[in-house]
Amino acid sequence: MAERQKLYEGKAKIIYATNDPDVLISYFKDDATAFNAQKRGQIADKGIVNCKVATHLFQLLESQGVATHWIETPSEREMRVRAVKIIPLEVVVRNLAAGSLCKQTGLALGTVIAPPLVEFYYKDDALGDPLLTRDRIRIMDIADEAQINELIRLAEEINTILQTFFQRCQITLVDFKLEFGLDQANNILLADEISPDTCRLWDQAKSDQADRVLDKDRFRQDLGQVAEAYQEVLQRILAQFNRK
Ligand code: TMP
């Protein structure tokens, strides 16, 4: 295989250059981190599962008119993606209260949030990914008013599509995190990944709180059966795609 230039190594993925400056390779690792990398580990075959899950979800979104960076998935841990300049925001959509929202507000776990909440966090590990406001995003020159509005619109649209899809998988989409990037023409594309690493997913067949978790909270909270939960999500997604 030709030597590839590593452009960036993150906690869960490595980005490589290709011969085409408009195309990058996103390589999915098994490494898992939580709490701003204070907790580290590996989840067996996570890279393969997340690459497959993200591939299917990007295809689903593309089929419904959402522009993503995904081009193709040539091997089990690699995606070819459009090169974008990542907007340094974690765009979080919440349908039910969990995680940091419960911790910071006292809302009970599972409280329904209707309409869904769209929040922005600054993608900066040194600062601990703080919650931002619209005005902070504007004065930090991260995005202008029109772009902020577009990010909110896209996040809501993606939430509607994913909620409907996961409902068919008998999974509740509790919350999730998105990242977006700008292409050469300044179009906003959905980037990064959507996977059990970046979503909270609850099995509708289970009522016990620890049992129903099918996402990275199993790793964060040491609930066990982490790789098995990721595989379960993949199998349910594949079953829906094979049904079509
Ligand atoms: P939070 O409740 O910890 O703020 O997380 C909200 C959602 O964002 C949850 O689905 C997990 C996801 N997330 C990431 O993908 N990356 C992160 O670094 C964090 C903090 C959360």
Image (cartoon, rainbow, N blue to C red):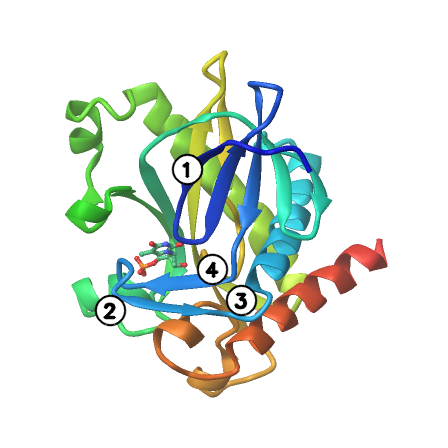
Q: Secondary structure at mark 4?
A: loop
> CB of mark 1 within 8 Å of CB of mark 4?
no
Q: Position of residue 41 (x, y in %)?
A: 40, 70
Disc on res. 181: none
Q: Secondary structure at mark 1?
A: strand
Q: Residue at x 84, y 53 (%)?
A: 244
Q: Is residue 227 among what the camera can see?
A: yes
Q: Is the residue marked 1 within 8 Å of ligand 1, measured from its CB?
A: no
Q: Secondary structure at mark 3?
A: strand
Q: Which residue is mark 4?
A: 197
Cα distance, mark 4 to mark 2?
A: 23 Å
Q: Is residue 112 above or below residue 177?
A: below
Cα distance, mark 3 to mark 1?
A: 33 Å
Q: Is the residue marked 2 within 8 Å of ligand 1, measured from its CB?
A: no
Q: Amino acid at mark 3?
A: Thr
Q: Earlier in the sequence, mark 1 or mark 4?
A: 1
> CB of mark 1 within 8 Å of CB of mark 2?
no
Cα distance, mark 4 to mark 3?
A: 15 Å
Q: Amino acid at mark 4?
A: Asp
Q: Is residue 238 left or right of residue 203?
A: right
Q: Earlier in the sequence, mark 3 or mark 1?
A: 1
Q: Quadrant of ligand 1?
A: bottom left
Q: Amino acid at mark 2?
A: Leu
Residue 69: quarter of image? top right
Q: Which residue is mark 3?
A: 172
Cα distance, mark 3 to mark 2?
A: 18 Å
Q: Position of residue 9 (x, y in %)?
A: 41, 43
Q: Secondary structure at mark 2?
A: loop
Q: Which residue is mark 2?
A: 107
